[in-house]
Amino acid sequence: MGSPVFPARPQHGPPRLCRLCLRPLEIDADEICDKPQCQTRHKIEVTAEIARKRERKKAAWRAISHRRTRGVLREAAREIGVSELGHIAHGLAPYIDVPLVPLPDARRAAFETHLRAIIGESFAKADGVTHHPEPPEDDPDFTLRLKQEKPEPAVLDTACIACQGDCCLMGGGRHAFLTAESITCQRWKDPDWTEDGLLQTYLSHIPPTSISGGCVYHGPQGCSLDRPLRANICNSFQCPSRRDLSEAVARRPGTGAVVAGLSQTHVNDRSAGAPYLRVVSMSPENKVTVHDGLTLPALRKGMPDD
């Protein structure tokens, strides 16, 4: 005698519907049906929520970082004769603990080889033409480059000095991002450049010491290469810390600046004196001071949970 067959248990309550299109869901489905439109919208929502969560985490980190460094920024300002932090431009920057060292001979040789190659490539493109290439005045990219080459206040380099070149580390393996197009741009602007003149000019700007493994031009005072000589990306890109400091300088022009370079992971070490800080100031006369005697206070509250 076979096993008894029981009728299916009737479903109680309203049917489960797709949250997006209200279509009835399969029994084993989640809250989204299998329609391509709903799946796409769901992925967009998930991506947006991840971005919002990341921004909330960044905002929380910034709030904690500002709170933890306010005292040391105030003390640094006092050390250079500014009685109130509100009287001087100030901000935060990343901090990478990388030493300044003389450029190793092998790296210098590799960089010089790269320079010779791109300078030779630029001049070779003349294809026998003896006069210099005419500036492409109708080229919007060239016009934009000229605009981005304009001098910036030296005080903005306070952020780069405190940071020690987090973004410039990428320029180490890519020879300061210089290309044949960078060289051609110099020849557009100055018809008197020669191959050797360009080579010696770029080599002469290498500082005695630079960030180990980073761009050859990132020295103790930030980038040692004049803005007109840099690669496009080095003028067009501005990290968030430098942009924030630029806004602070605009609000307090002529005051100098003080910046706390702070490791992203400082929130993981609550102890006083945690080794994740580098405070740098620059006076209105562009005198740079590294405040080695300042340390982080204890962290009372850590990052919020993910």
Image: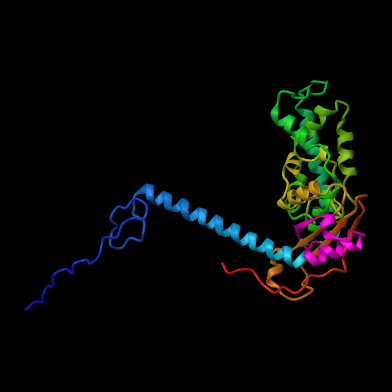
The one of 113 and 229 positioned closer to us in this rendering: 229
Residue 105 is situated, as x and y percent measured from the top left of the image, at 86, 53
The one of 189 and 33 positioned closer to us in this rendering: 33
Which residue is pictured at 13% across the width and 73% down the height?
Answer: 6
Say whether residue 209 is magenta: no
Residue 90 visible:
yes
Q: Choose top left, top right, bottom left or bottom right for residue 209.
A: bottom right
- The residue most toward the bottom is 1
Q: How is the image coloured?
A: rainbow
The one of 69 and 48 positioned closer to us in this rendering: 69
Residue 172 is situated, as x and y percent measured from the top left of the image, at 76, 51
| Quadrant of the image containing the N terminus | bottom left
The one of 54 and 106 positioned closer to us in this rendering: 54
Residue 212 visible:
no
| Quadrant of the image containing the C terminus | bottom right
Say whether residue 97 is magenta: yes
69 relative position to 35: left or right: right
Q: How many marks?
A: 0
Residue 188 is situated, as x and y percent measured from the top left of the image, at 80, 27
Q: Choose top left, top right, bottom left or bottom right for residue 101.
A: bottom right
Query: Which region is colored magenta?
Result: 70-98
Which residue is pictured at 87% across the width and 52% down the height?
Answer: 256
Picture layout, residue 78 above or below residue 3: above
32 relative position to 145: left or right: left
Which residue is pictured at 58% across the width and 69% down the height?
Answer: 305
